[in-house]
Image (tube, grey):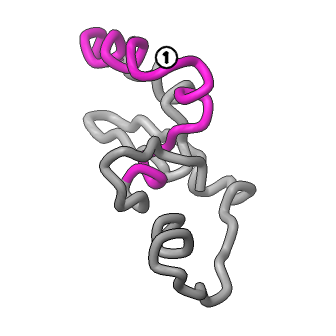
């Protein structure tokens, strides 16, 4: 969306900032099901994955800098259309 505004000079309709939406920041592990909210950061996901899937946890540990892991979310990555952008907290 940032590129739409800066490069294509598009006007955006009202945008909703979901940063405070607690429902999107939940991790639920029930049996063989893991539900990860779109607002969960890599830093929040890391200890869960380290316990359940150690090799994936190690991958997350090496992803970006501390600042990126504290801000990057799954939902932000999906919403970001730019391959060069880092995910941003929704």
Q: Residue at position x 32%, y 34% from top?
A: 31
**x, y percent for residue 78:** 36, 56
Residue at the extreme right: 20
Which residue occupies the foreground of this view, 20 or 82?
82
Q: Main secondary structure of the magenta part?
A: helix
Magenta span of residues? 52-77
**How many numbered marks have been drawn onto this rendered protein structure?**
1
Residue matched to label 1: 47
Asked if the magenta segment contains residue 57, the reply would be yes
44 above or below 30? above
**x, y percent for residue 87:** 47, 45
Where does the C terminus fall, quadrant-wise?
Answer: bottom right
SS assignment at label 1: helix
Q: Residue at position x 69%, y 66% from top?
A: 17
58 above or below 33? above
Q: Residue at position x 55%, y 25% from top?
A: 43
Neighbour tally class for label 1: few under 14, some 14-19, many 20 plus, Cα within 10 Å: some
Relative to 39, 48 lies left or right: left
Relative to 6, 81 lies left or right: left
**x, y percent for residue 80:** 41, 58
Asked if the magenta segment contains residue 24, the reply would be no
**x, y percent for residue 85:** 43, 46
State the image quarter where residue 24 is shown: bottom right
Which residue occupies the foreground of this view, 16 or 22?
16
């Amino acid at each position: 969306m940032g590129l739409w505004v800066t490069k294509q000079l598009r006007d955006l309709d009202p945008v909703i900032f979901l940063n405070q939406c607690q429902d999107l920041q939940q991790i639920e592990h029930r049996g063989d099901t893991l539900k990860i909210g779109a607002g969960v950061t890599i830093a929040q996901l890391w200890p869960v994955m380290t316990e359940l899937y150690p090799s994936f946890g190690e991958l997350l540990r090496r992803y970006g800098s501390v600042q990126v892991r504290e801000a990057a979310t799954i939902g932000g990555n999906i919403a970001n259309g730019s391959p060069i952008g880092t995910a941003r907290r929704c």
